[in-house]
Amino acid sequence: MLRNASKGALRKGVTELSKYPKPGDKIHGFTLLRSKHVPELELTALHLQHDKTGADYLHVAREDKNNVFSIGFKTNPPDDTGVPHILEHTTLCGSEKYPIRDPFFKMLPRTLSNFMNAFTASDHTFYPFATTNEQDFKNLMSVYLDATLHPLLKQSDFTQEGWRIGPENPTVAAAGDSAKAVDSKLVFKGVVYNEMKGQMSDAGYLYYIKFQDHIFPAINNSGGDPQKITDLTYEQLKKFHAEHYHPSNAKVFTYGDMPLEDHLKDVNTQLSAFTRIQGDLDIRRPIDLSGGPQYVKVPGPIDPLMDKEMQYKTSTSWLMGDTTNILETFSLGLLSALLMDGYGSPLYRNLIEAGLGTEWSPNSGFDNSGRIGMFSIGLTGVKEADVPKVKAAIHKTFQVAHSNGFDRSKIDGYLHQLELSLKHKTANFGMTLMHRVKPHWFEGVDPFESLAWNDTVAAFEAELAKGGYLEGLLEKYLLNDNTLTFTMTPSATYADELVQEEASRLATKIAKVTKEAGGEAEARAQLEKQELELLVEQGKSNTQDLSCLPTVYVKDIPRQKEVVEVRDSKIDNVNVQWREAPTNGLTYFRAVNTFENLPEELRSLIPLFTDCIMRLGTKDMAMEQLEDLIKLKTGGVGAGYYISPSPFDFKSSSEGMSFSGTALDRNVPDMFQLLRKLVLETDFDSAEAQLRIRQLLQGSADGAVNNIASSGHVYARAAAESGLSDCGRLKEQVSGLSQVKLVTSLASRPEAEGLSDVVEKLKAIQNLAFSGTNTFRAAFTCGTESVGQNEVLLQKFLSSLPGGQSSPPMVPTLDLSRNAKTFFPLPYQVYYGALALPTVSYTSPAGAPLQILAQLLTHKHLHHEIREKGGAYGGGAYSKGINGVFGFYSYRDPNPQNTMSIMRNAGQWAVEKQWTGQDLEEAKLSVFQSVDAPQSVSDEGMTRFLSGVSDEMMQTRREQLLDVTKDQVREAAQKYIVDALAKKEGNMVFLGEKKTWVDGEWDIRELGMASLPEPETLGEEDIKQTMSGS
């Protein structure tokens, strides 16, 4: 949020076509090919080409201060070694202009960007960032262009990020003969290697990637299969870069209100060093299915949280049209939504509601990311006997839909959602646009056509008016058996076989090194020497001179926060917050109803209640009718669990339920009516209610293990924080591992037992939801012209709610007794961990130094130790100001014992560290990336409404952050980490495979899983035996 001198008058009319060059004009080494104004998106698009190299360039000019840059390259993977993915990592490890270790991560605290990342897609790789500051934009663009076009690609970067063999604990190489045998065991290491082992622990990802292997063998696994990653050589990596990371193979995207001319000048300077080559224009296609049905079966892991009889995953896929046909692609997307979106959709009713499975398979839906569209529909949680029934039910559904046709009101509902998405003002519009345009651009789809929403919708309406349009598309693509049916069968030995395969592969690699080195001792010495050299190289990370890196400065950050004007009023004894702003004719509504003494048995069922009201229907309306109304009249309505600590005392909190809705101003009456109907009139007593609730529970339980695998550190942090405050404990019940355990236990309850006890509790929540207007508060974000109408409508809504307070019985105070070390056994190949400590409330002056300390530890210590040296995919420290928590975490971590030691000693490291002014400067910049990140209009004023943190409190915290000193940081580390750990105030939580180090000191919490064979853990002797037998 730096103030730019050139804002204002110079920025007026950035979308005016007349101010730009004409097609054919040359500008800073580029030729403008064409330009187009798109009024419905309030933008102007300009397509240019670099004269010397042929690089493609798309600029989208829009009155938006959050500017975006991205450079991307076509990277068809030649095999499954993950070379595009490993290259994405290693390019960011140092470049010619910035020859330091990890300039990408070193830039994170030297920028005010609100987004920085890099992505490896199936056939292209791209590097985007977003910032509101011009100097920051120039700095980051320079770093990104140099990183991608001129990376150093050192061998040590390849072994760190890709793969290597080394002692399990990296410190062993330095310890020599004094190292423990368990620590010196040789293992495969590497950041990407461990990341992909973690990905492969996610059964949903595994199903999807194996499906892609079979329907799209021409596109190999760009992320990398761990079994093949270890075949990649350093020479292959360098060759792939030389062939693919070239301007002739590049697409550059810029967005926002900054001058195009400045961008072109800077980009041209970098690109002009290259001469044109032939880019990778190869657009891969899926297999030919025209010869009739094909069937593939592959083994997969057992889901320990699911019924052992419901472990199959199966799907059937059809190939659709060429995605360069924008109209047809749009229409097929809408056809897919009509067939499978929502509980009332025909495919949901005939597959999941019919009991054939519990949830959609990971590949379900219309995939238009490639040149040829694909439509897949399938289920997880399928019984073996039901596998063939799934395909038959899909075929039958298509036939009935074709003969019955599609209801115009349902089509209008989807078009209405499209209208709302265009009107909704988001803070990340540019990034969303880039993600929408870029994949298709790499497939040869015209980006201008991708942007022309009104043209596409008008063409669709014209086709629809002729009659039978969608039915014709259904007949053209889906009423045939030119299909691939892909089934994953449960294998009790799957995890064991993975361990055996890795051991065998490791043994083979060690045997090769042993042969080349002349003996076992020599081989070990060589591998430990490599590890030691890498440790030395990694050690430079914290001592290097970073002055070559550009930066913005704390002095540029405004001391005064930009104030968002909100006002308060009272309507029928209800406090109402108003944010009046230009919203394109939309009204955003939020409300909170707080409860006193909510029983735990009700609290933990609120997530199920909020699912039920969107599933069960009412006495007079089926869910299908309600869903149609929601789509036709609103941008969504919903309810959820609400909890917030007090800004004055983090140990006290208020809880209840939150409600929300968005609608065009003219539809606000319908929004209120729907919200009231869903919450108060959902029919929990219908004949089918218990069956539907069971299906919701099974759908949530199916894939819970995968959800934890993708966000394991979040669950670990929540579990660690649950013993520190009421808020932590209550939140964990509703959204943590406790909730997973509850849902899976209810989902696996025998049908004969029924769910009548659950239904009674859900009805009790229904009675509580809108009870007592004295505990109710509301917030509106809308245009000034809509305030009067919304006041009247809120008053009418409130008067329609049941009166009186339906207080639940008093409950005893929560027991916050805890074990300092908790372990959750889960079937993963890597670990997720957290250590959490209690700190101070939001209004305490100590909060600011703790926030700065978290950034210092992450960027100056933990990233280096846990990721670079330890091989985890991620690790760091965090400070939650409103929650009064300071913590540490690691993600996809192969080395948990080492990480625990690093976490425990981090406070002492911070106390002893001689912090510099530059260290503090960078930490403050890091904090303000999120503090001053642009907000969507719908989020403005919401911190105040939801948490009670006033503008004055935020301004005070802002000044405290800007003024934090080195002494304050050291004092915070001593008091809240070192001293707190000495008093045993911390909670450590780890998730993963239970090994011998999880001893009697740990409180082991089972999640009620089905029994599985223990995966074998192979020591070095086992590996030698495998080696001699292979």
Image (cartoon, rainbow, N blue to C red):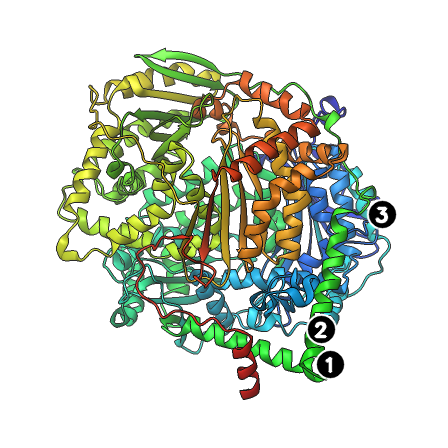
Front residue (pair 91, 964): 964
Task: State the residue at coordinates (44%, 53%).
Answer: 333
Front residue (pair 1013, 454): 1013
Q: Identify the mark nearer the N-term, 2 or 1.
A: 1
Residue holding disc 3? 269
Q: Do the residues labelled 1 and 3 touch (CB within 8 Å)?
A: no
Q: Identify the mark nearer the N-term, 1 or 3.
A: 3
**Given this view, does label 2 or label 1 mark the residue nearer the observer?**
2
Q: Are marks 2 and 3 in contact (CB under 8 Å)?
A: no
Callout 3, which amino acid?
A: Thr
Q: Which mark is residue 525?
A: 2
Callout 2, which amino acid?
A: Ala
Callout 1, which amino acid?
A: Ala
Q: Would residue 399 appear left or right of 99 to someone viewing this image?
A: left
Q: Identify the mark nearer the N-term, 2 or 3.
A: 3
Residue 148 location, quadrant:
bottom right
The image position of residue 645, as x and y in percent, is 42, 27
As helix, strand or loop, the secondary structure at mark 1 comes to helix
Q: Is residue 531 above or below residue 648?
A: below
Q: Which mark is residue 517?
A: 1
Q: Is residue 464 above or below residue 805?
A: below
The image position of residue 286, as x and y in percent, is 52, 70
Q: Are marks 2 and 1 in contact (CB under 8 Å)?
A: yes
Residue 474 location, quadrant:
bottom left
Residue at the far front: name it: 178
Q: Would residue 88 appear left or right of 328 to someone viewing this image?
A: right
